[in-house]
Image (cartoon, helix red, strand yellow):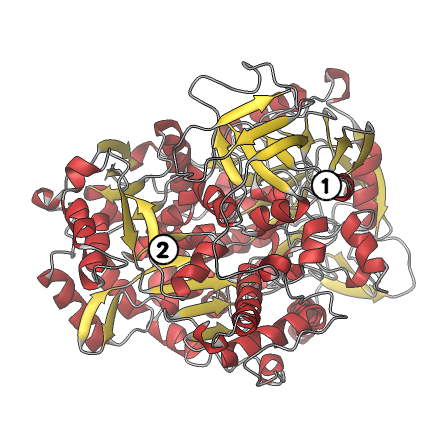
Amino acid sequence: LPFSIRVLLEAAIRNCDQFLVKKNDIENILNWNAMQHKNIEVPFKPARVILQDFTGVPAVVDFAAMRDAVKKLGGDPEKINPVCPADLVIDHSIQVDFNRRWQLEGWSPQRTGEKVETSPLRNSCTGPAGPEALPFRGQHACPASFPYIIISPFSVSTSSLKFIHSAFLSDRADSLQKNQDLEFERNRERFEFLKWGSQAFRNMRIIPPGSGIIHQVNLEYLARVVFDHDGYYYPDSLVGTDSHTTMIDGLGVLGWGVGGIEAEAVMLGQPISMVLPQVIGYRLMGNPHPLVTSTDIVLTITKHLRQVGVVGKFVEFFGPGVAQLSIADRATIANMCPEYGATAAFFPVDEVSIKYLVQTGRDEEKVKQMKKYLQAVGMFRDFSDLSQDPDFAQVVELNLRTVVPCCSGPKRPQDKVAVTDMKKDFESCLGAKQGFKGFQVALDHHNDHKTFIYNNSEFTLTHGSVVIAAITSCTNTSNPSVMLGAGLLAKKAVNAGLSVKPYIKTSLSPGSGVVTYYLRESGVMPYLSQLGFDVVGYGCMTCIGNSGPLPEPVVEAITEGNLVAVGVLSGNRNFEGRVHPNTRANYLASPPLVIAYAIAGTIRINFEKEPLGVNAKGQQVFLKDIWPTRDEIQVVERQYVIPGMFKEVYQKIETVNESWNALAAPSDKLYCWNPKSTYIKSPPFFENLTLDIQPPKSIVDAYVLLNLGDSVTTDHISPAGNIARNSPAARYLTNRGLTPREFNSYGSRRGNDAIMARGTFANIRLLNKFLNKQAPQTIHLPSGEILDVFDAAEQYRQAGLPLIVLAGKEYGSGSSRDWAAKGPFLLGIKAVLAESYERIHRSNLVGMGVIPLEYLPGETADTLGLTGQERYTIIIPENLKPRMKVQVKVS
């Protein structure tokens, strides 16, 4: 059996009670080779559940509401309690509201023989290349606020340099504290609610804000690998309410993302019901090129497996090339499993895994026992031993030597582009038809530009100008090799006299405090700060759309020039409208490449032929001049990434946040809902709950609310980012006395169904075929009015008219977001008719009673001549089952 299937088998045997898990289920898993193609369902009871706060708050809200409902029906409300251990990591709330406040462009702590003058009164500034050079790529720019610094070639005392450098760093480090303070100001009510939940429910642990990103904390601290419970050893396994839960597969812990509704069921003791998956064996061969990063490898694998087709399947990695990858490299590859469509991306435990557990401060004696247990039960892997290679449904292969430096974009993570082709590819996208690889900009507008004033200096934006550069996301910040690589590149860039334009929103948001620790100890942090990559918070931040505001002059220039501005981030998703409303193009890249593109200031650069910039001596500096080698990085990593760091950071993780410690939370077992709250509200899902199950009803004469195309993501359906000032949700909040500054994000308000219903389909990049343009609007068919989606749905609701949605392929791809099903349910949507679905979203729709219907093979809305203007009757039989054909009548 594949090692991943052995985990399912062990869990089935251990939990077999002849009720939830039956002997026949065990036989089906044992006969995996024969049963994998037969769509056989098997139960899986994972060892634990993990949640982040955007999905965790609604889960706790649901539990609180369930307790109320059980009490109302005459039951014991405390029976609503997790029986499966659950960890909730608060990492999605912090935003990049503050980053660098000023910068000493042109100054380096390593340069001598320079005189520093200050003048608080002058309104112009001069860089080493002269004022006329300021607007251009790679040149030195004016500080963002006075007293500003002028650099001229004269001597200066060492003490003066130290004083100025200290002031410079302390001011910029203040961004971290300000972002954290604002996070608590915005989210105090949510945090108090979560703290109540941690006390009211058993088996629920909260990791406070400011600790790191859920999946990196899971990898470095929460993962057990092997449970030791009541005298028994058994494999660690989990499901999580975040699609990138798969990151833990890189450590040999089987886990994947599920919807919030499924996670709640698991927490209450129910097994996951899943189709016994096919397992694709992914053989890795060879050694990566010295200049290739793990990010390049995962983007290559993502594109490859998208082409292979692994939706609904497990991928298990094997072959001699696996031994060449660190656990951090494997975790990076496993993290992006949702982007290539698989359910899990499993690396069985081997000797490298064991060494990682020791490196990250786990108890060495316990680690030895883990290894003995895994060896005893045939779950410890030696990738050089071909006799251990299991049977697979299919085998595909990648020679790591063929991987080249690359990015992905401009709108999807699977659209890999070699770095050498980035300039050509972007310019091709400019003129291409609107789509995943097109912006439909007329040829005579490709060189449009817009000048603007920022901090008393003039700059120019064009198509392809970088305005956001973020080192973010557990995908990469969990990997010391790419983080130290970024730090070494920054050091070489600063020493070469390069800088980043002040209007580019740069940020560094590590996934744990360990990252800051080794960046500081290795001496690269001052250079990252010099280029604007200060630590701005510990959380997902830019990767999930919490990128915060861009400078107003930049926004005006983008808008007035109708420019395709660019965000570059070391994240895992770059869907339209996700990173920032004003960056129409977004590219995923390794942390060193994020810095490189920030220095260049544009995506329209060929690094092999064009310099990153020109330094004060007039010398051209190319990327190859400052790119660190794998050997350089490994020397630093071996010296500075040590067990003591992990122990020091994690031994106090649950108590180090004083703001969290000071929060007061009620001690009642039933939550006392505040009717004035705009964050936490009792949801309507259980209001009409009865002890008798109601049979499903046919859907009669439904209108189409939206007619959508392919790859509509959960970000399109239920955005997590900022609440637009002209949206239905904004009007709701304004009517309750809130100002735009207090709106916060949709993600932070998932505990309030009234706001989330108004935020459903509120993404400004939603492309509705009824309108043939991007807008969060639709046509109210009975009247012909163009309305916001919520307002149209409300008119249908008041008239008692049911609704459906038409969609294309991959409906609901992206994050595992239960509000992408809850929101449509509250809008009155009864069914979705699509060509195909993302697994988690389909499950969430079922959980909310929204029927996911799939066209028969070879049929689409186009082949059937459907425009969405029709009315639909869907005949639902009482014995409705998965894969059953149902009749849809169209009039």
Image check: 397 left or right of 144?
A: left
Determine contact: label 2, label 1, CB under 8 Å. no
Q: Nearer the viewer, residue 291 or 29?
A: 29
Q: Which amino acid does label 2 sit on?
A: Ala
Label for residue 168?
Answer: none
Q: Can residue 498 be seen in this view?
A: no
**At x 27% / y 64%, what residue is drawn?**
225
Image quarter of residue 664 = bottom right
Label for residue 800?
Answer: 1
Label for residue 328?
Answer: 2
Helix, strand or loop under label 1: loop
Q: Residue furthest front?
A: 692
Q: In this view, does 357 lie above or below 857?
A: below
Helix, strand or loop under label 2: helix
Q: In which quarter of the image is the C terminus?
A: top right
Q: Nearer the viewer, residue 578 or 669?
A: 669
